[in-house]
């Protein structure tokens, strides 16, 4: 367990104790957690700086929660050690890890210190049990997830070249078709009382339409996932607060080809004319173009970082954007913070960087 992860766990444990008894003394907390009183004092100071604790008697700040709905996968990734040779056997490394766009976003949100809830489906099989336990241990609340009998947990198989770039992928995500409005109806009240709702386009068009209809009063953040899946949300752009497409997804949705910088503004204007509030478009090595309806548009350069693994960078960025919105940060500051989250994902061999935390992101921004 890393130092950042340990700190996050202790802070969560302290918040849980104070929720039961706001008048606990620091020495009592230290005794219950098996740490020193000075350590408790440091954790209390950090929680106060983050706005989690305020006032006398350790009054906890009102709970705000982010609910993420979408895909949960077992990711199996193969990476070639040398230049990839197609139609041949390649030396490389193969690893299995918890994945899925929505699940990854939810985990990153939890690691950044916000209350994160995931609503997804897994099968009643070993992969499903592993995914739920891994996600829970990462700090995500999984009580709203569904475990379905006689279903196979979603699996995502990807092949990467020696530079870490994905060459091709195959996904077996049929189980997500079971995440229907009829199934979600039992969670509707819970969803409607969230502070931010994050959706991925792995959800069916019918389910997305149902969520936009019943949760349109919420700030809804959407990850298009792919050019093909992005088209599901075209009729509902006016219901979306923040959309995070890449260049190709933005082109396919708007019908505008991006060939020069002026085209970025054209694309943004088209999205805003459809009712979209905020656009955050990933431009890869060229950074991020971001635009707000009735506001400003600008390009922000990418962080200089060694790219170890591109999988999960967009999920970390979305998590950063959602967390910053919850904390009422400015749009430009939110984008820069989200870029730092993405840079940390790029620099890790894991899809979700285990060192990600609000403190580690702020330290990267300061550096």
Image (cartoon, rainbow, N blue to C red):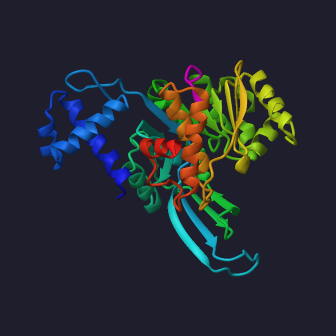
**Compared with residue 346, is residue 336 higher up or lower down, i.e. above or below?**
above
Magenta stretch, main secondary structure class:
loop
Residue 152 location, x and y as percent? 53, 58
* Image quarter of residue 359: top left
Side (left or right) of 82 relative to 106: right
Side (left or right) of 132 relative to 298: left
Image point 79% across, 26% down: which residue? Answer: 269
Residue 192 location, x and y as percent? 49, 24
Residue 90 location, x and y as percent? 67, 79
Side (left or right) of 173 relative to 294: left
Image point 57% across, 33% down: which residue? Answer: 334
Q: Is residue 21 magenta?
A: no
**Compared with residue 231, is residue 84 higher up or lower down, i.e. above or below?**
below
Q: Is residue 218 magenta?
A: yes
Image point 56% across, 35% down: which residue? Answer: 321
Count of numbered marks? 0
* Image quarter of residue 292: top right
Q: In front here: 136 or 329?
A: 329
* Image quarter of residue 219: top right
Residue 312 location, x and y as percent? 58, 52
Whether residue 328 is visible: yes
**Compared with residue 319, is residue 72 higher up or lower down, i.e. above or below?**
below
Q: Which residues are magenta?
A: 215-220
Image point 41% across, 55% down: which residue? Answer: 134
Quarter of the N terminus within the rendering: bottom left
Q: In front here: 112 or 359?
A: 359
């Amino acid at each position: 367990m890393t130092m950042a992860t340990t700190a996050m766990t202790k802070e969560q444990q302290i918040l849980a104790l104070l929720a039961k008894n706001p008048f606990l003394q620091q020495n009592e907390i230290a005794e219950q957690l098996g740490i020193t009183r000075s350590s408790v004092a440091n954790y209390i100071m950090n929680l106060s700086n983050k706005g989690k604790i305020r006032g006398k008697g350790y009054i906890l700040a009102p709970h705000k929660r982010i609910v993420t709905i979408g895909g949960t996968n077992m990711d199996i990734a193969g990476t070639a050690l040398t230049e990839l040779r197609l139609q041949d056997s390649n030396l490389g490394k193969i690893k299995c890890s918890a994945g899925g766009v929505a699940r990854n976003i939810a985990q990153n949100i939890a690691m950044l210190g916000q209350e994160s809830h995931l609503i997804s489906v897994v099968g009643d099989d070993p992969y499903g049990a592993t995914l739920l336990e891994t996600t829970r241990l990462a700090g995500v609340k999984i009580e709203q997830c569904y475990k379905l009998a006689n279903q196979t947990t979603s699996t995502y198989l990807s092949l990467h070249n020696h530079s870490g770039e994905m060459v091709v992928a195959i996904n077996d995500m049929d189980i997500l078709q079971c995440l229907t409005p009829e199934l979600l109806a039992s969670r509707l009240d819970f969803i409607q009382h969230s502070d931010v709702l994050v959706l991925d386009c792995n959800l069916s068009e019918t389910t997305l339409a149902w969520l936009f209809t019943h949760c349109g009063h919420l700030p809804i953040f959407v990850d298009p996932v792919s050019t093909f899946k992005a088209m599901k949300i075209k009729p509902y752009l006016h219901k979306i607060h923040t959309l995070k497409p890449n260049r190709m997804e933005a082109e396919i949705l708007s019908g505008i080809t991006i060939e020069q910088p002026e085209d970025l503004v054209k694309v943004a204007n088209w999205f805003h004319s459809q009712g979209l509030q905020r656009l955050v478009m990933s431009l890869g090595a060229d950074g991020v173009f971001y635009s707000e309806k009735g506001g400003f548009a600008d390009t922000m350069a990418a962080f200089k970082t060694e790219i170890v693994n591109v999988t999960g960078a967009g999920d970390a960025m979305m998590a950063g954007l959602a967390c910053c919105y919850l904390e009422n940060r400015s749009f430009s500051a939110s984008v820069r913070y989200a870029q730092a989250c993405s840079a940390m994902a790029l620099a890790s061999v894991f899809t979700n960087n285990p060192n990600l935390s609000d403190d580690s992101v702020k330290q990267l921004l300061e550096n």
